[in-house]
Every structure is written in structure tokens, then in C-alpha cells.
Amino acid sequence: MCGIVGIVGKSDVNVQLYDALTMLQHRGQDAAGILTSHKGKFAQQKANGLVKDVFRTRHMQRLVGHAGIGHVRYPTAGSSGPALAQPFYVNSPYGIALAHNGNLTNTADVSDDIYRTDLRHVNTDSDSEVLLNVFAQELLKIGKLKPAPEDFFTAITSMHNRVRGGYACVSLVANYGLVAFRDPHGIRPLVFGKRDTENGTEYMVASESVAMDVLGYTLIRDVAPGEAVFITSDGELHTHQCAEPDLTPCIFEHVYFARPDSIMDGISVYKSRLRQGERLAAKILKERPDHDIDVVIPIPDSSRVAGQALAQQLGVKFREGLVKNRYIGRTFIMPGQQQRKKSVRQKLNPIRLEFEGKNVMLVDDSIVRGTTCQQIIQMAREAGAAKVYFASAAPAVKYPNVYGIDMPSAKELIAHGRTDSEVCEEIGADWLIYQDLDDLIAASSDGNEQITSFDCSVFTGEYVTGDVDQTYLDRLDAARNDNVKAKGDKSIDQGENAVIGLHNDEDDAAVSLG
């Protein structure tokens, strides 16, 4: 999962891009990057680390230009070295940079086709670089010295015919403007908005609407599935439907990833989480009308809204019994089980008086690997809880995600191949209750009745692109399970298998790409 942003303004956009990326930091803490365009030249800064650590004043001083794109990343495919930080860049045609959120499911085939047919070199194992090269090649085929908006749309139409998966992208083309597009299923989110200044209208495209709020942009709407947006360097807005739309957005955005103050496909993430809590409470009352729950305690942060609604519907106290260290990253996207286990203890600390002698209902947005809930249940018992119940605002996660969320290996998912009672025993709870899938879907679709289906593949094993089989999943598992990640991290630390990064050097020398 990643966060992307693109801006075409009437003055330098570097600070705007920085501020937008800080608002999208929850979508990735592995690396960050900004690329700007000024008089046909690209300048960029990208590196591993948080936004606040990657960019310094000296970087911002050279990131000049009225147009730019930005990216925050955590690795879902490929390694996590600095060469994988985005945006990526190719010089032909025109000079194109791209930042991508999502994951392609036919990367291997497309990469081979790029090499054998298009004679293009892909320097990393990132599907984002593959996607950039396909877009560039389709533009090159048009063969115009000065492309018009419809030429970019033609290239994107052809690109959709070559790639499959979940993807939302922003791309900057030197001297021409900003291109943004979304996959035909709309799996990954993308919105655009504008703000009026005394010098004219400025436009922004981003993964979540919250990035616009902080900068005073007004949300226009979501980029439709299969739609492309082109904003010229002069600020003219063009849109075009480049593929047949079949809106099936990822429901896990509403469960976990997105900020609650974001609007996605017309759905308030905050309200969807409220409804998740209400529906989960109704299930609890149906299964255990005489429950003995004394207090509901959310596992911060993404379960807080659902937990409040659940407690209100049950008529029991809601308490913040776990204090979060906000300087530790999101645990289930951390590579390596041992690192995740260590991180939970560093991240959360119980307030003893909220647990001691009480029957506690812990609420989390979901249970993925089970690392977090196992540790927290043990912490609750150590804090004196009489009984520890556990409620998941999402159904059991039993299958890997292939569209950009780091759930690569089915055998690393605690619910895969286990019954609910077996999961309950594994995590050490006195009782475990999951949200029903129909209730989760209703919690989101109630916000926009025009959406008739969601990508629920992590719960059902049904993949909307129709090209994911067991062979693909086995190959994914072999490439991305925890053991492989641990070996990859070790080799990077030892300086082995280093990928050449076409990006700024450590001495922060200015880079002009164009």
C-alpha cells in the first residue's frame, strides 16, 4: 500500500507536496519521494524513511517548479532498498515520471514483453517501473513531437489492455503536464480537487481526500475506474474514460488503511466504521444477549470509531485502555514476525485500572497475522483482566491480497485453514467474534448505494481481475513470505545484490532529469 499525490499549481508546489505526503504517511513508512518539473527539467529527492526524515531545507530549495508528484511507500512487491523509492523516471518519450499505488498481477509477462517486444530495460523488480515503461512505450508508438490530451488518453487506453491488477497512478510529463489514472475496477483509491488562487486555479490528485483538506483544496470527485485525468502545465483540466468501468473498490481501505476523515468513492470512511461497530454489536447481542462485558477497549487507532459505536449499542463503557507510542510504525506492514512482536510491546501499553478485575472486550479493525492481538490479549491478562474477549470489525482474513496490501502468504494469516474457535484458542482469548461479510459490505455500501460490489478477496479468495490462480499465489508466497524478507533484509545490510538506484546521491547533489 502506498500514497500518491500530484499537483499542478501557479507557484512552486514543493511545500504543498510535502504537506500532502505527511497527511498520507499512514499509507507507507518505508520510503518517500518528490519530483518536480521546472522549464522542462525534473528535480527529485527520494530515500528510505519517513517524510520528515527524507526532506530537508536544502532539498526543498532545489525542488522548484509549478508541477510535481509525490509518493510514500511500503513494500508489497520487490525489495525495500532505496532504489525502489518512487517516483520512477524514463527519458523517452518526452521525459516521464510516475508514482504508483497498487500491484500488477501480470508483472512477469508484461516485463518479458517489454524486453522482447519493446526493447526496454527495467532496472528493478518493481511493478511500478514496469507500469511506467508500458505507459511510455504506448506514448512512443503515437510518435508525436507535441502530443495533445487525446494522445495521452490513447496511450492509457492501450496500457489498460496490457496490464492487469489494482493500480492508481500520477505521472508527470516534462513540458506537458500531469496525468493520473485508475485501474478499470477502481481497486485502489484516487481523487482530485481544485482550489482557486489570485493567479488562477490549481489542481491536485491524491490517494485520499484528507490530503486536500489540509491544503484548502475542494474535492471535485473520485477518478472513475478506468478514467484518466490530464492537467496541462497551464492548468487546463481534461478527463476521459479509457476503459470500461467495473467499480469494485478494495473494502480493506474502509477497514484499516484509510484515515477516517477521508471520503472514498462517495463513502465516508468514518461513517462506514461507525456502521461496522453497530452491526458487530448487533451480532454480539444476538449470540450472547446476556453478555457480561464490562468495558470495550479499542486497539488504537483504526478500530477506535468502530469500538465507540459497538460500546454505545451494547450499553457498556468505552475506555481508552491502551496508550499508543506514536513513533512506532503500523505493525502488520512490518517485515518479519519477530520485528512485529517486538513492535507491539513498544507500541502499546495498558492502563491497569481499566483492565483490573474486569471482563474486557478488545476491539480491532481486523486480525491478519494475529501478532498484535496475541500480544495485547496477554498484556490485558497481565494488567489484571478477569476475562478477555476479542471482536474483529472485519471477517476472518484467510487469503492473501494481490492488489497492493502486504498480506502475501496465506500460511502467515492466522485464520487460514483454522476455524474461528481455533483462532480464538491460538490468540488466547476467552471468546472471539468476527464481523459477518454481508454486514461489512453493508456498512460500506450504505454510504453509496451505487456501489454494488467490493473487492473482498482477503475474506473470500475471489479476485476481481480473474487472473489469480493457485500457481500465482504459490509464486507470490515463494517471493514474499517472512523468511524471504528476512534473507532479503540481511543481504541488503551486507551490501549484496544491490540494485543500482537512478536517484539522488547520498551527498544530496542536485539531480536534473530531463
Image (spheres, grey):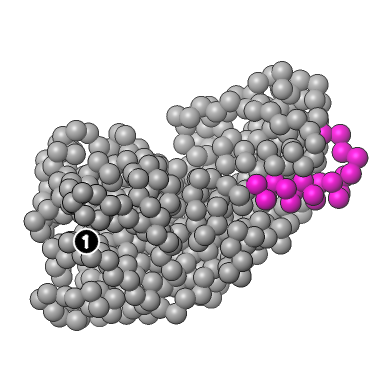
Compared to 512, does 360 lie above or below? above
**Residue 246 can be seen in this image:** yes
| Residue 218 percent coordinates (x, y) | 38, 52
Q: Is residue 292 magenta?
A: yes
> Which of the two residues, 322 or 306, is positioned nearer the viewer here?
306
Residue at 49% x, 49% y is 262
Outermost residue on the right side: it is 290
Q: Residues within 10 Å of mark 1 (few under 14, many from 20)?
A: many
Residue at 46% x, 36% y is 329
Residue 261 relative to residue 197: left or right: right
Residue 198 relative to residue 222: left or right: left
Dominant secondary structure of the residues highlighted in magenta in the image: helix
Outermost residue on the front side: it is 198
Pointer 1: what residue? 235
Residue 132 relative to residue 160: left or right: left
Q: Is residue 306 magenta?
A: no
> Which of the two residues, 377 or 176, is positioned nearer the viewer here?
176
| Residue 425 percent coordinates (x, y) | 77, 42
| Residue 490 percent coordinates (x, y) | 38, 41
Residue at 44% x, 70% y is 225
Compared to 365, does 121 lie above or below? below
Q: How many marks?
A: 1
Outermost residue on the top side: it is 353
Where the C terminus falls, by quadrant? bottom left
Question: Which SS class for mark 1?
Answer: loop
Picture quarter containing residue 237?
bottom left
Picture quarter containing residue 363?
top right
> Which of the two residues, 27 or 111, is positioned nearer the viewer here?
27
**Residue 7 can be seen in this image:** no
Identity of the amino acid at label 1? Answer: Gly
Q: What span is colored magenta in the figure? A: 274-293
| Residue 305 percent coordinates (x, y) | 62, 41
